[in-house]
Image (cartoon, rainbow, N blue to C red):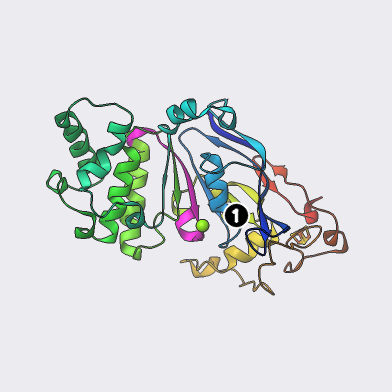
Amino acid sequence: TQTILEATELKKYFPMRAGVFSKVRGYVKAVDGVSIKVQSGETFGLVGESGCGKSTLGRLLLRLITPTAGETFFEGTNIYQLNSKKMRDFRRYFQIIFQDPYASLNPKMKIGNIIGEPLIVYNLVSTDQEKKKRVEELLEIVGLSKAHYGRFPHEFSGGQRQRIGIARALTLNPKLVICDEAVSALDVSVQAQILNLLKQLQKDFGLTYIFISHDLSVVKYVSDRVGVMYLGKIVEMGDCNRIYKEPFHPYTKALLSSVPDPNPRMRKEHIVLEGEIPNPLNPPEGCTFHTRCPQAMDICNNIVPQLRMLTNGHWVACHVYD
Ligand code: SF4
Ligand code: MG
């Protein structure tokens, strides 16, 4: 397998001020030293509670925002060092699908133009006829119909609108697609249809996915590997099935204990985490999870546990495994 995307020690700190012209009061460490490698053709799931930094990480990986520190390599090229013209060329290869496709679909534009716009922007078609042909193809690929070409976004259901969002993401034949809570706004039955569509498209077009969600069942359904985030850091990472079967990190254990297992013999004891997620402006010293961790020890109060590989491809940041 080949690495398509590699991030090293990525950080994004947002300055906090009381007002626009006030002094910086501190920094929210939304992403705080994340290193990941994504293999071509895989689905890498990114889970964690809301506010853990997974969406910020997704945006950093596509250079939709710039990092405070760290690098991201797309097929070996450091994307933060590209000038804007080169970056524009690269953007073709990675796309993002958001939770609410409606917000990103111009209500006054016909579906055909929404999906076909990137072809015009990138000068990939010279006639309307060519554009129409490609868009009709895309409509069918995502399970809509040619007849939808001239319709407007409000004429579609939530699931259909997410199909339109997916079609638009595919217009330029991307290699990597980041799905950020892509099915979170949909009913469960519609979720399954969209997830199956994404899986099919991955097979047909050799796509690589980074699948961001707070929903552990959804992530399990689609992911080959998974990274678990807590307060801007990845605390556990590895093969999805293995982590879901036997999580190592106390935070992962607690998260997974709340996912209902259909097999009653496999049901885990429900671990209730004490307290709230700490204020990211003022995170705890040492292991940032120590204020809620059922296994916390003295060392956890002041020494940050490093993410290290415990067994083949399974990474954990926790002093229990030192
Ligand atoms: Fe818990 Fe300590 Fe491990 Fe952090 S390092 S998860 S506080 S046991
Ligand atoms: Mg988010």
Q: To which residue does mark 1 refer?
A: 53
Q: Amino acid at mark 1?
A: Gly
Q: Is residue 192 left or right of residue 58?
A: left
Q: Is residue 83 above or below residue 203?
A: above
Q: Residue furthest left?
A: 147
Mark 1, Cα crowd under 10 Å, few <14 / some 14-19 / many 20+, is many
Tell me the SS state at disc 1.
loop
Q: Residue furthest front?
A: 21
Q: Residue at x 15, y 48 (%)?
A: 148
Does ligand 2 reach within 8 Å of label 1's beta carbon?
Answer: no
**In the rendering, at what x and y percent does residue 93 appear?**
42, 32
Residue 225 visible somewhere in the drawing: no
Quadrant hosting residue 35: top right
Per the image, is 213 magenta?
Answer: yes
Q: Is residue 282 left or right of residue 76?
A: right
Q: Residue at x 51, y 60 (%)?
A: 214
Quadrant hosting residue 167: top left
The residue stretch that appears in magenta: 204-219
**In the rendering, at what x and y percent does residue 236 appear?**
65, 51
Q: Is residue 245 above or below residue 258?
A: above
**In the rendering, at what x and y percent does residue 147 appear?**
12, 47
Q: Is residue 68 above or below residue 296?
A: above
The answer to which of 182 and 207 lies nearer the viewer is 182
Q: Residue at x 49, y 61 (%)?
A: 215
**In the rendering, at what x and y percent does residue 317 appear?**
73, 51
Residue 152 visible somewhere in the drawing: yes
Q: Is residue 182 left or right of residue 83?
A: left
